[in-house]
Amino acid sequence: MSFINGIGLISPQKTLDPSEFLPEVMEYTVDYLKCIEPVYRNYIDPIQSRRMSRLIKMGITSARICMTDSGCAMPDAIITGTGLGSVEDTEKILGEITKEEKFLNPTPFIQSTYNTISSQVAIQLKCHNYNSTYVHRTFSFESGLIDAMLQMEEGMASDILVGGIDEMTMNHLRIMRRIGQWKMEPVNNLKILETYTSGALSGEGSSFFLISNKRIPASYAKLSDVRTFFNLNGSFDADKILPGFLSGHGLTTEDIDLVILGLNGDCDYDPVYTRFAGQFFPGKAQGWYKHLCGEYHTATGFGVYTAANILKHQRYPEILHLNHIIPSRLKNILIYNQFRDVNHSLMLVQGL
Amino acid sequence: MARRIYITGTGIISCLGKNLRENLTALLASRSGIGRIHYIETLLKDELLVGEVPLSKEELFVLAGIAPAEGYSRNTLLGIIAAREAAVHGKLLENRDLKTGLISATTVGGMDQCELYYSDFLANDTRNAYIDSYDCADSTEKIAVELGISDYITTISTACSSAANALMLGARMIRAGRLDRVLAGGCESLTKFHLNGFNALKILDKEPCKPFDQRRAGINLGEGAAYLVLESEESIIKTGNQPLSELVGWGNACEAFHQTASSPDGVGAYLAMKKALEVSGFQPGDIDYINAHGTGTDNNDLSEGKAIEKLFEGRIPHISSTKPFTGHTTSAAGSTEAILSVLCLQHQVIWPNLNFEVPMEELHFSPVKTRITDQPVNVVMSNSFGFGGNDTSLIFKKY
């Protein structure tokens, strides 16, 4: 049994204080949604943070917020997921080696290594326990959760810190626009479903969760299941997969009170979600969140944040509503995500 | 009773050769694959020694059985070649009803192409086919498509311990009953990106690397890919595969000391080896040979050596680093050395630590200098340590 006992989230929304749940909706008209960053010196020694790039600081800080929120002093494992790692550091190196191939400052190279945040968090916490990092596109964060839940099952750990961290830069945005991943012009984040254009609204975020096999008074919710599906030649057949996924927990689609979908404003792939919801959850409450955080490889971290808080606060904020149906109870939430119809994931979050 | 994890297939490409047989031949001949750079365009070409796979990209396409196309990095091609060899060996392409996973490790990913075309990425549309192939997941997904694996796939990146962590996760998923069999390992090609990065850290030896030697001066970077097929007992009943050896122990720990340096007492290495022993049920005295991480840096060899002395207390097993053969293949090192360890068990041999002459002042042991063939090899430990103090130890047992 896995519980969510603490959350730390840095996002384009006001999420720094874990005691609040989306106190105010931030509306932007931008190329990509940028995180609202904290005052780092409140969390990291300024001497240490001086050379840290932005992603590292966001990662360490959200991990710290999460640990404090959970009341856990030392995790039995630290696991992170990141699709791209520190883009800023990688770009610095690429800029230097494509010019004259002489860079003398090794700091960006060190920080560009994908497991930098999981190890920096370990250094901050002096945690010698299991440490790992997953780097598989939109499976990155989910792979971390799967590893954590596997450790619970193995009896190897009881408190595990799991994070999902990704950043965006203007250069990277420009490059990914070339292959149609992002919208070509600034858009209003709250109106991305009205654009009907190709490409998602890009975003970023750093989320950490303390996953535990112990329920505490401050537990948010139960993380009941996480699964990833690589859609190879149509192997992700929701007709077969979804009933099996739910029945493993004694549930059917009827028992799901709210399905949270990963719509991101990309008119080419959003229909995958609407078909899924229309087929399995007609007449059910359907919610979404990527208009608040943008699309990024570990955006489902924001999704888990919303599910956990909906269950904890027993409040389903209107800004998350995709249809007009209000659930009669808030107990079983299914989070469904997909990336280009290749990488699909399902997560079941349940009330306590 | 915990499920046993059998190794039933291996595939490897390295500077020693393009398949398992060629690698074994070079190892048995004590022939190092370290030499000058031929295929990576870098200003460091004449300055550094590396373990480069002696094939051009065109030749790699042919070996991988893929028509030359844009969007393939050298890393992905190396990965496909080794993964396919392991998959054929372990009959992974048959028995499709078995739940099969792919857990792959890489850190530079498709950086070899990205660094060539980065200016184009920024300025024009001519190299768009390579934009999507620069991240770490690209090689994993292309391997999964080639081999038709879809039940579980993921990519791990913990720097130089990545592939060992991939094997560890594969074993854990089988033991937990989530998968019947897993193709696990890693791939890494040489890039200007990390050649320059390691060079800036001043931890590259300009001469052949000399792990555990007082005169050691750093790493020779290498490249390659190595994959192993892991199977459960139930799985081998169906596949009819003959186990090559068993993966019996695994442990990961974090130094929590420094982003790139190891602690002087090797706390992470000690904890990783200790955990692996616990999982395996073996005592320190049961280990016949340690295939050490042994990069040849001042820092690693001292830290690892101290940790080994502490754990094995005066009864030190045979130790060698095989990096003077293969170079340090970073994210692929864990699975490369896992295969070399399996070969020790299969062929009852212990690989020498090439280039070793002068014992380290701080350590009470010396690595194996010449190949040992006259002693039983039943249990082998393989260490892989990475940046961030990410330390993993695996234990293999003779079948």
Image (cartoon, rainbow, N blue to C red):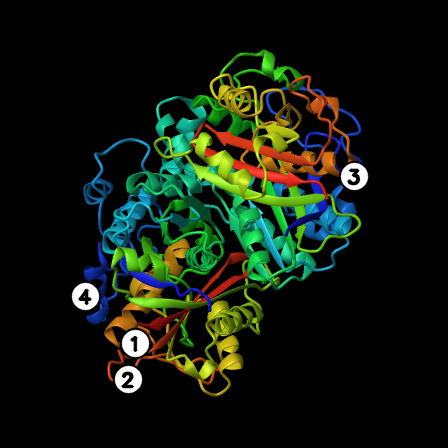
Q: Are marks 2 and 1 in contact (CB under 8 Å)?
A: yes
Residue B288's label in the rendered image is: none
Name the residue type under label 2.
Gln
In the image, is residue A93 above or below residue B355?
above
Of tags 4 and 3, the one toward the viewer is: 3
Disc 3: host chain: A
The residue pinned by badge 4 equals B25
Respond whether the residues carrying marks 4 and 2 are from the same subunit: yes
Q: Quadrant of residue A72?
A: bottom right
The CA distance from mark 1 to mark 3 is 57 Å
**Residue at 67 percent of width and 26 percent of height:** A292
Name the residue type under label 1.
Ile
The CA distance from mark 4 to mark 1 is 14 Å
Of tags 2 and 1, the one toward the viewer is: 2
Q: Quadrant of the C terminus of chain B?
A: bottom left
- Crowding at label 1, few (<14), some or many (≥20) Cα neighbours within 10 Å? many
Q: Secondary structure at mark 1?
A: loop
Name the residue type under label 4.
Thr
- Crowding at label 2, few (<14), some or many (≥20) Cα neighbours within 10 Å? few
Residue B375's label in the rendered image is: 2
The CA distance from mark 4 to mark 2 is 20 Å
Does the rendering let one see residue A92? no
Q: Position of residue B214 (x, y in %)?
A: 43, 77
Q: Secondary structure at mark 2?
A: loop
Side (left or right) of A129 relative to B221: right
The residue pinned by badge 3 equals A17
Q: Are marks 4 and 3 in contact (CB under 8 Å)?
A: no
Q: Secondary structure at mark 4?
A: helix
Q: Nearest the camera: B51 or B102?
A: B102
Disc 2: host chain: B
The residue pinned by badge 1 equals B350
Q: Nearest the camera: A308 or B26?
A: A308
